Image (cartoon, grey):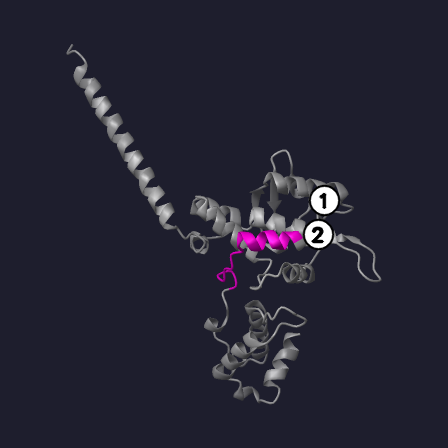
């Protein structure tokens, strides 16, 4: 797919004519193109543009030529946050089909990456401790234990009881093929786009944005950045800090907590000094 896209843009050019300026023109043009089979007016996602740029880079590297792509051309996919509003969430879940609704609920209430939910195994669920172990990920932080909410626990218990293989969400049946319990589900893109369309949500959001929404709400609820980083599977707190946007109310509450703490410390200190002064001399 990415090769055909590159051929469409660069097919009439010699390799030495593909320079950073022409790659930048390609990048901006792709972002303005409508997404294939999309009826909601959404355009090509930055992640898709990144894959094309990476393919172009690999082609030049294979030919032992200097790549015209630059690091700054790539989009920071995790850095792009779209927080789903409560109104959008309610409308989306009213129209979402299954298993999309359950998968989206797990992402929204645990902060797991979509791919982590797709590859969730029954053996990694601990209902006694209400926790999920995720063994996947490129970093040590990504391989983590995640607590379940009550709703997520009920959802995963239902799917575990019905599972015919190792996967909680196995590949569903399709036209001309039976259900494949030995394979995990790989995508719910069509169902997701359909739910957004039926819900009448104007600003398109990715399934991954439910993870962003979880993180932002957790930060606003007062979850400290170190704990949030561990829950999300981030290697550094810098990756997590973009979700922490204290409001004026949060700042006032923080000052009130500090004020109360200081007053308590001073009171206890004064009380201890007063008590020692009142003790009779031996």
x and y, in percent, of residue 32 in the image: 55, 76
Q: Residue at x 66, y 60 (%)?
A: 198
Q: How many marks?
A: 2
Quarter of the picture containing the C terminus is top left
Q: Residues within 10 Å of mark 1 (few under 14, many from 20)?
A: some
Q: Residue at x 67, y 55 (%)?
A: 95
Q: Is residue 97 left or right of residue 87?
A: right
Residue lying farthest to the right in this orientation: 176
Specify the label residue 99 is tagged with.
2
Q: Is residue 61 left or right of residue 174?
A: left
Label 2 sits on a secondary structure element that is loop
x and y, in percent, of residue 279 in the image: 19, 13
Does the segment drawn in magenta span residue 41? no
Label 1 sits on a secondary structure element that is helix
Q: For mark 1, what is the residue?
A: 159
User: Which segment did they paint magenta?
Assistant: 77-94
Q: Nearer the viewer, residue 39 or 213?
A: 39
Which of discs 2 and 1 lies nearer the camera? The answer is: 2
Does the segment drawn in magenta span residue 91? yes
x and y, in percent, of residue 131 in the image: 60, 40
> Does the residue at mark 2 contact the one at mark 1 (Cβ under 8 Å)?
yes
Quarter of the picture containing the N terminus is bottom right
Q: Residues within 10 Å of mark 2 (few under 14, many from 20)?
A: some
Quarter occupied by residue 190: bottom right
Q: Would you say residue 249 is visible in this rendering?
A: yes
Q: Nearer the viewer, residue 166 or 221?
A: 221
Q: Residue at x 61, y 89 (%)?
A: 12
Quarter occupied by residue 188: bottom right
Q: Residue at x 53, y 85 (%)?
A: 18
Q: Nearer the viewer, residue 184 or 256?
A: 256
């Amino acid at each position: 797919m990415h090769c055909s896209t590159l051929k469409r843009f660069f097919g009439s050019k010699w390799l030495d004519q593909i320079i950073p300026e022409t790659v930048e023109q390609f990048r901006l043009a792709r972002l303005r193109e409508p997404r294939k089979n999309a009826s909601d007016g959404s355009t090509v996602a930055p992640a898709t543009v990144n894959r094309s740029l990476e393919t172009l880079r690999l082609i030049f590297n294979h030919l032992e030529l200097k790549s015209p792509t630059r690091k700054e051309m790539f989009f920071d996919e995790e850095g792009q946050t779209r927080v789903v509003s409560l109104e959008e969430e309610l409308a989306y879940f009213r129209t979402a089909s299954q298993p999309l609704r359950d998968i989206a609920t797990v992402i929204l209430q645990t902060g797991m990456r979509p791919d982590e939910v797709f590859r969730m195994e029954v053996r990694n669920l601990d209902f006694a401790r209400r926790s999920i172990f995720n063994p996947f990920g490129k970093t040590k932080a990504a391989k983590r234990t995640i607590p379940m909410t009550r709703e997520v626990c009920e959802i995963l218990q239902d799917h575990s009881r019905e599972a015919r293989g190792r996967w909680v969400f196995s590949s569903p049946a399709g036209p001309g093929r039976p259900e494949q319990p030995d394979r995990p589900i790989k995508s719910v893109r069509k169902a997701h786009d359909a739910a957004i369309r039926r819900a009448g949500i104007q600003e398109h959001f990715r399934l991954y944005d439910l993870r962003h929404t979880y993180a932002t709400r957790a930060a606003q609820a007062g979850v400290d950045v170190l704990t949030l980083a561990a829950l999300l599977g981030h290697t550094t707190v810098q990756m997590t800090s973009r979700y922490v946007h204290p409001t004026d109310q949060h700042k006032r509450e923080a000052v009130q907590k500090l004020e109360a703490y200081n007053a308590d410390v001073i009171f206890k200190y004064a009380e201890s000094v007063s008590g020692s002064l009142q003790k009779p001399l031996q």
